[in-house]
Image (cartoon, rainbow, N blue to C red):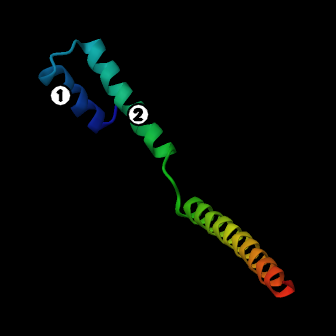
Amino acid sequence: MQPLNIKLYDLARAKLHLKDSDAMEFVSTIHELQENLKDNLVTKDFLSKELSDTKFDILKWIFIFWVGQLSITIGIVLMLIKK
């Protein structure tokens, strides 16, 4: 066991009044949770890529909205001119 795990083990036994096997299981569970947290962290590269993809999607939908609005406006103006 690493020094921090030994200290945690001792604290679990002393303060929480756990048996040796329960204290060891407690420490191993905390260690597993800590490892899982490290695996689930977001990197700068991943975040940058996700943000750029999102920005592109937003710009695409804004462009589609503008084209739709422009075509409706032109249609209304043409309809008013013909009358």
- Image coordinates for residue 72, horizontal then vertical, percent: 76, 74
Mark 1 crowd level (few <14, some 14–19, many ≥20, 10 Å Cα): some
Identify the residue shown where x is 26% and y is 19%: 23
Q: Could you say which is closer to the camera, residue 75 or residue 15? A: 75
Rendered view: 42 above or below 6? below
Label 2: which secondary element: helix
Q: Which residue is mark 1?
A: 11
Q: Element at badge 1?
A: helix
Q: Residue at x 25, y 14 (%)?
A: 20
| 41 relative to 17, above or below | below
Instruction: Judge from the rendering whether residue 78 lies leftward or rightward of residue 50; answer left or right.
Output: right
Vertical placement of residue 18 versus 35, above or below: above
Measuring from the top left, give residue 9's x and y in whole percent: 24, 26
Label 2 sits on residue:
33
| Residue 82 picture location, percent across and down | 87, 85
Which residue is at a point 16% across and 21% down the rendered structure image? Answer: 16
The amino acid at mark 2 is Leu
Q: Position of residue 14 (x, y in %)?
A: 13, 22
Foreground label between 1 and 2: 2
Measure the C-alpha gap from mark 1 to mark 2: 18 Å
